[in-house]
Amino acid sequence: MNINATLLGQTIMFAMFVWFCMKFVWPPIMAALDARKKLIADGLAAAERGKHDLELAAKRSAEVLREAKEKAADIIALGDKRAGEIVEEAKVKAEVEAGNIRTRANSEIEQEVFRAKEQLRTQVSGVALAGAGKILGREIDAKAHNDLLEKLLTEI
């Protein structure tokens, strides 16, 4: 055998093997690799989208939490303000009621003073009549007595 013929035969067989592999073996392998590469790229993209969505959700949750805290602070402030208003209203009502009680008490005191003065005038007039009756030694008629008392009362 000739080594040149063997080399030539092996070269031809190798070329046919390469052609066969390129024609029938290589395309399915490349399709499988492309599909695998696409699957991996889609998975990485989905992971990136998930990571991005997670960051957005974290930011949104922080924003919602901040808004909730602000609303809670506003509600507490409004409650404190309303409590202060209720206390002020109660103070005003209490002051008005105290004023009314003072006014009624003052009017009752004035009425009592007026009654006491009237009783005192009546007693003074009785004493004066008794003293005048004893001095004069006689009784003065009631009409003249009342007229005299009225004059004295107006002078007092």
Image (tube, rainbow, N blue to C red):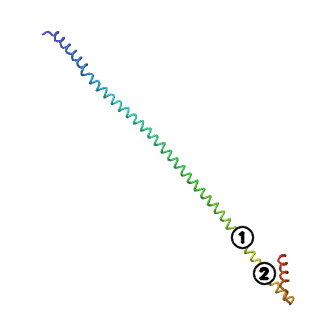
Residue 27 coordinates in the image, percent (x, y): 27, 22
Residues marked 2 and 1 touching at CB (< 8 Å): no
Front residue of 79 and 28: 28
Residue 58 coordinates in the image, percent (x, y): 44, 40
Which residue ends up furthest to the right in the rendered image? 136
Q: Which mark is residue 18?
A: none
Q: Is residue 156 above or below residue 60?
A: below
Q: Is residue 111 above or below residue 45?
A: below
Residue at image location 21% in from the left, 17% down from the top? 17
C-alpha separation, residue under disc 2 versus residue under disc 1: 22 Å
How crowded pointer 2 is (Cα within 10 Å; few <14, some 14-19, many 20+) is rated as: some
Residue 77 coordinates in the image, percent (x, y): 56, 51
Query: Which quarter of the figure has residue 111?
Result: bottom right
Residue 96 shown left or right of residue 132 in the figure: left
Query: Which quarter of the figure has residue 95?
Result: bottom right
List the residue tagged with mark 2.
122
Question: In the rendered view of the protein, which quadrant contains the C terminus?
Answer: bottom right
List the residue tagged with mark 1.
107
Question: In the rendered view of the protein, which quadrant contains the N terminus?
Answer: top left
Which residue ends up furthest to the bottom in the rendered image? 137
Front residue of 1 and 23: 23
How crowded pointer 1 is (Cα within 10 Å; few <14, some 14-19, many 20+) is rated as: few
Q: Is residue 28 above or below residue 130?
A: above
Residue 90 coordinates in the image, percent (x, y): 61, 60
- Which amino acid, by three-letter code, is at mark 1? Ser
Residue at image location 16% in from the left, 10% down from the top? 5
Residue 81 shown left or right of residue 46 in the figure: right
Residue at image location 56% in from the left, 52% down from the top? 78
Residue 59 shown left or right of residue 144 in the figure: left
Query: How many discs appear?
Result: 2
